[in-house]
Structures are given as structure tokens and as C-alpha cells.
Image (cartoon, helix red, strand yellow):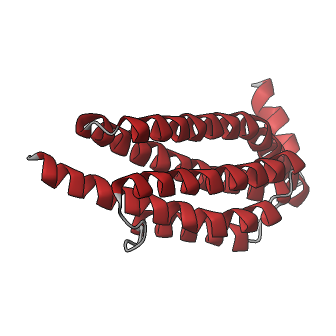
Amino acid sequence: MEENALKKLYIEELRDIYDAEKQLIKALPKMAHAATSDELRTGFEEHLEQTKGHAQRLEQIFDALAEKPTGKKCKGMQGLVSEGSEMIDEDLENEVKDAGLISAAQRVEHYEIAAYGTVRTYATILGEQDAVALLEKTLAEEKETDQKLTELAEGINAQAAGSESEDTAADHPDSNRKARAARAR
């Protein structure tokens, strides 16, 4: 592939990520509002501020390229945000809803990690060293956010499992007796 074609692809991918970040800037406040865990809500609020910074870094890259950041719709992020919205609208117990929100958020993070890793590689090949530094910083932040979500999930998912088993036991009084009988065998 000649460099000119790779540069065009690089710019199109940057536009795609920029649109993805703009979609997230709109979606994260809704996720924060829907979260019942204070820690999760705070995490979403902090990531919103970080996401605004990601968009600004992309704008810096576009300025250096003398290109406009707009003109592309990120359909992948649109789908992920739509799935997150469905989770918000679900009628679920608090901890279960939070577990679902974390799942949706981690899908977003993994998508972003893949996208930023790809454009960083393109920038490296194209000799765009200033862009490489900005993209690596964002990539590291996306990985850090994913790790924080994983840590939150460990506690919240356990709480969600506990609330489900309590609900099940309350709905089915025989379930505790059956569980004890199964363990006794």
C-alpha cells in the first residue's frame, strides 16, 4: 500500500474515532445517571472528562494534518451506545443494572483500545511522531479505564449474584431446602 493511501485511511480512521468520542461525550452522563453504585457513577463522570480530553487530542492531530475532524459516523460506537441505552432502560435490580452498565462500558473500552492501537500504528508508519505520543497517551488511559471497570465489576458482579440468589430464594422457599439436601448428598 502506498503511503498516500495509508494516510487517507489513517485520516478516515481518526475521523471515525473522533465521532466515537463525541458519541461517548453524550452517552456517559446518561450512564452515570443510571448507575446506582457511587463508585461506578464517579468512574463514569471521571471518564467523561477524560473523553473530552481525548477529543481535544484528536483535534490537535487534525490541526497538525490540516484536516477537519468531522465527516464520518462511527457506526460501531453507535451500536455500542445503543446497547448501553437498552441496558439503562432495562428493569433490573440495582446491582444487576450496574453489572450490565459495566459490561456495556467495557465493550466500549475494548473498541476504543483496538481503534487507538490501530491509528497509533498508522501514525508510527507515517512518521507522525507528535500524533503517536498523543495517541499512546489516550490508549494508555483507555486501558486504565478498562482495568478500573474490571476491578469495579469484581465487587458489583458478586453483589449482583447475591441479590439474584436472594431474590430467587425469596421467590422459591423450597430452594434453600433443595440446596441443603443437594449438599448433604
What residue lies at 60% left-to-right and 56% top-to-bottom? 104
| Left or right: where 181 falls relative to 117 | right
User: Residue 118, how many percent across, how many down?
Assistant: 34, 43
Q: Depth check: give the residue in front, 168 or 59.
A: 59
Q: Is residue 172 visible?
A: no
**Is any part of residue 50 visible from this angle?**
yes
Q: Quadrant of the C terminus?
A: top right
Q: Which of 63 and 125 is in front in this view?
A: 63
The total of numbered circles placed on residues is 0
Q: Where is residue 40 in the image (x, y as percent from the top left)?
A: 80, 49
The quadrant where residue 29 appears = bottom right
Instruction: Give percent across and percent down for residue 73.
Output: 41, 72
Q: Position of residue 93 (x, y in %)?
A: 82, 61
Determine the residue positioned at 55% across, 71% down.
82
Report the side of 94 relative to 47 (left or right).
Answer: right
- Can you say whether 81 is above or below 185 in the image? below
Residue at screen point 62% across, 34% down: 144
Q: In front here: 168 or 158?
A: 158
State the residue at coordinates (57%, 55%): 56
